[in-house]
Image: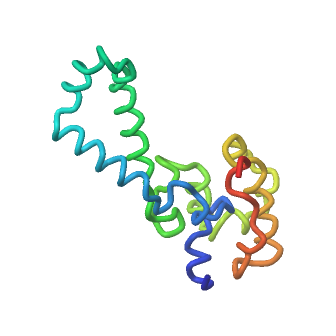
Amino acid sequence: MNANSERELTGYCGLYCGDCVRFCNRFSPLAADLLSALDKSRFANYAAIKSRSVPALKSYGEAVAVLDAIASLHCDTPCAAGGDGCVGSCPIKECVRKKNLAGCWECKTCDRCALLDRLVPMHGDAPRRNLKFIKKSGLNNWTANREKFYPWL
């Protein structure tokens, strides 16, 4: 990967956007297409009647809600490139921009920053370890040594 792409895909928080399941995924557009096809065929009406013999179709409304949520998870622009990859406002992004930094790795207090705590449930300590590595080694070719984006991978 070239250095520009690596830099563009490095989130302010030290996560690598290229590892995120939301980034340029195939499933969000597929879910949107499926929802559209179901809507065009008025499948809800079919499911309501057919649910008498296919009990799982009683949960059709819940399935639609899940598909809708999946369709909304698509991200094609990392935060450092101006995107909103983390769905909604991000206090980390706001802090970095307010301080006019390239990322948290340039901040003197990032090792003890409470804003990073919000990432722990989804990412464990990976952001902090990545930030420490970027701070030490720089942005070029850092991703070869990155921590896993999600602890369950």
Could you tell me which residue is drawn at 39 percent across and 26 percent down?
62
Could you tell me which residue is drawn at 78 percent across and 51 percent down?
125
Residue 129: percent from left, percent from top = 80, 60
Q: Quadrant of residue 95?
A: bottom right
Q: Farthest residue to the top: give it.
A: 52
Q: Farthest residue to the front: give it.
A: 53
Could you tell me which residue is drawn at 57 percent across and 60 percent down?
98
116 in relation to 57, above or below: below
11 in relation to 143, above or below: above
Residue 37: percent from left, percent from top = 23, 44
Pick the residue in front: 50 or 150.
50
Could you tell me which residue is drawn at 20 percent across and 38 percent down?
39
Q: How is the image coloured?
A: rainbow
Horizontal side, residue 123 vs residue 71: left or right: right
Horizontal side, residue 17 vs residue 106: left or right: left
Placement of the N terminus among the 4 image quadrants: bottom right
Q: How many marks?
A: 0
Pick the residue in front: 80 or 100.
80
Pick the residue in front: 60 or 138.
60
Residue 86: percent from left, percent from top = 52, 51
Horizontal side, residue 45 vs residue 127: left or right: left
Residue 87: percent from left, percent from top = 48, 48
Horizontal side, residue 22 vs residue 30: left or right: right
Q: Quadrant of residue 109?
A: bottom right
